[in-house]
Image (tube, rainbow, N blue to C red):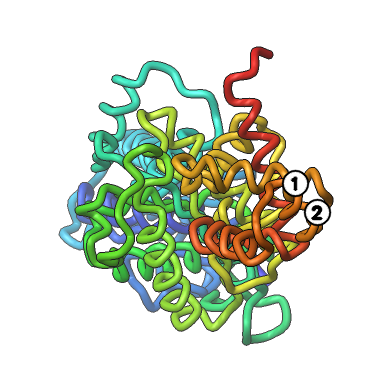
């Protein structure tokens, strides 16, 4: 079976189109086995050239070509008008067209440029922020607005093998033609196609392409740079949420998680596959996008491991796993501060917690030491649970509160 690379086939199609137009003559391109892979006369494609030729070889100008380690020929016939063409000029023209087409074929398309730009923005060190903003503008991205990263793990869909078809044949492929080297390139084409379908689903869900910047960043993951101001998340806000003005990084996080949950439902419907979503906090500035990505990546990794699949994961919903699994101390201190912020103006409750843990979570000894009735202690513990969402009488949540207290105490401690 003749194997033709997609780029070789693309160049061949471009060459016959441009050469036939410029010379007004029939043109064909054959592979190294003499089989026609592109022709201005479509019925000739797939046939051996000796069955297509209608005259002696001397009536054709034959120009050898080589691309991607593949060889072939561009064959130019006499113009239908009978006008004589210079073989030397024809050869020079064909070589020029082949070289120009090959160079253009190597250039990444808009999607590839966008994917690489966002990948580098989130994962690698960046240079001058003004240059990044300009490059983003060229690619149609407004990076001046507050944005948080939503990281979608769609590997079960994007990286899955072809669902149907002959063994070894990728979905949508043409028998006898594949991207080199065989199944590998076919798989890459399938991955790109499925990633683009996930991106299209994301854009369709938010219904505002300019508001949502997203890209495939590899490993089955799609990163969404979601505009995250209160106005941008009004569709998922609740009147009882209230932005946390004291902590801009956690502002609008409840609405952002609701948006992530609704997006998860949409993606699962569109892909019929397992999907996981990680939500990152908002961090200011261009470099803040990389910080938001690290939050989302950590939440996604830990969430999948400890809480399972088909869920939305965020650092403040991971419980003890966040304090154990996150390596960055600053992030852990920020998380501890966030979890305990509802108690900032409740010194009595903070004192109660300190004594409660000092007394090994024993209610009777805690009440005695605080000189209060056990019912009063129970009321205070209930209030702590109501304010923070963490009940100090439950082991896992008590450990989380205790760790948060210790980490928060490091905020102003000199290193």
Which of the image's four quarters has the C terminus?
top right
Most foreground residue, 170 or 350: 350
User: Quadrant location of residue 249?
Assistant: top left
Determine contact: label 2, label 1, CB under 8 Å: yes
Q: Position of residue 109 (x, y in %)?
A: 37, 47
Please give the name of the residue rendered at 30% of the width and 61% of the height, measured from the top-left corner: 26
Considering only vertical position in the picture, is 278 above or below 284?
A: below
Q: Secondary structure at mark 2?
A: helix
Residue on which the image places disc 1: 369
Please give the name of the residue rendered at 69% of the width and 70% of the height, measured from the top-left corner: 308
Most foreground residue, 246 or 232: 246
Q: Position of residue 96 (x, y in %)?
A: 35, 35
User: Quadrant location of residue 306?
Assistant: bottom right
Residue most toward the right? 360
Cα distance between the residues tagged 2 and 1: 6 Å
Q: Position of residue 77 (x, y in %)?
A: 34, 57
Q: Secondary structure at mark 1?
A: helix
Residue most toward the top? 414
Q: Position of residue 177 (x, y in %)?
A: 57, 69
Residue 137 visible to the viewer: yes
User: Quadrant location of residue 165?
Assistant: bottom right
Please give the name of the residue rendered at 41% of the width and 35% of the height, measured from the top-left corner: 283
Residue on which the image places disc 2: 365
Q: Give me the disc on residue 271.
A: none
Most foreground residue, 11 or 148: 148
Q: Is residue 340 left or right of residue 323?
A: left
Residue 221 visible to the viewer: no
């Amino acid at each position: 079976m003749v194997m033709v690379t997609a780029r070789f086939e693309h160049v061949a199609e471009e060459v016959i189109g441009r050469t036939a137009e410029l010379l007004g003559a029939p043109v064909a391109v054959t592979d190294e086995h003499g089989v026609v892979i592109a022709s201005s006369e479509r019925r000739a494609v797939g046939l051996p050239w000796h069955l297509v030729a209608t005259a002696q070889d001397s009536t054709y100008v034959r120009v050898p070509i080589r691309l991607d380690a593949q060889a072939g020929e561009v064959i130019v016939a006499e113009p239908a008008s009978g006008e004589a063409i210079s073989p030397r000029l024809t050869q020079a023209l064909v070589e020029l067209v082949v070289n120009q087409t090959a160079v253009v074929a190597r250039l990444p398309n808009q999607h590839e440029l966008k994917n690489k730009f966002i990948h580098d923005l989130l994962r690698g060190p960046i240079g001058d922020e003004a240059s990044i903003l300009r490059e983003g503008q060229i690619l149609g991205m407004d990076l001046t607005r507050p944005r948080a990263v939503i990281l979608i793990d769609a590997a079960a869909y994007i990286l899955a093998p072809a669902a149907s078809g002959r063994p070894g044949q990728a979905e949508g492929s043409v028998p006898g033609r594949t991207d080199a080297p065989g199944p590998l390139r076919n798989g890459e084409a399938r991955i790109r196609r499925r990633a683009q379908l996930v991106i299209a689903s994301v854009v369709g869900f938010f219904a505002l392409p300019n508001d949502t910047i997203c890209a495939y960043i590899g490993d089955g993951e799609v990163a969404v740079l979601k505009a995250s101001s209160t106005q941008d998340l009004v569709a998922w806000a609740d009147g009882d949420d209230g932005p946390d003005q004291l902590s801009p990084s956690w502002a609008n996080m409840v609405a952002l998680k609701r948006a992530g949950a609704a997006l998860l439902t949409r993606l699962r419907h569109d892909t019929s596959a397992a999907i996981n979503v990680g939500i990152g906090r908002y961090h200011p500035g261009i470099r803040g996008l990389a910080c938001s990505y690290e939050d989302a990546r950590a939440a996604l990794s830990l969430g999948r491991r400890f809480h399972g699949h088909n869920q939305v994961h965020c650092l403040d919903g991971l419980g003890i796993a966040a304090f154990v699994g996150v390596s960055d101390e600053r992030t852990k201190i920020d998380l501890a501060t966030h979890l305990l912020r509802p108690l900032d103006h409740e010194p009595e409750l903070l004192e109660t917690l300190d004594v409660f843990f000092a007394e090994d979570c024993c209610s009777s000894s805690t009440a005695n030491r605080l000189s209060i009735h056990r019912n009063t202690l129970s009321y205070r513990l209930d209030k702590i649970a109501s304010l923070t969402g963490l009940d100090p009488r439950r082991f896992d949540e008590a450990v989380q509160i205790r760790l948060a207290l210790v980490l928060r105490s490091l905020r102003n401690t000199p290193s």
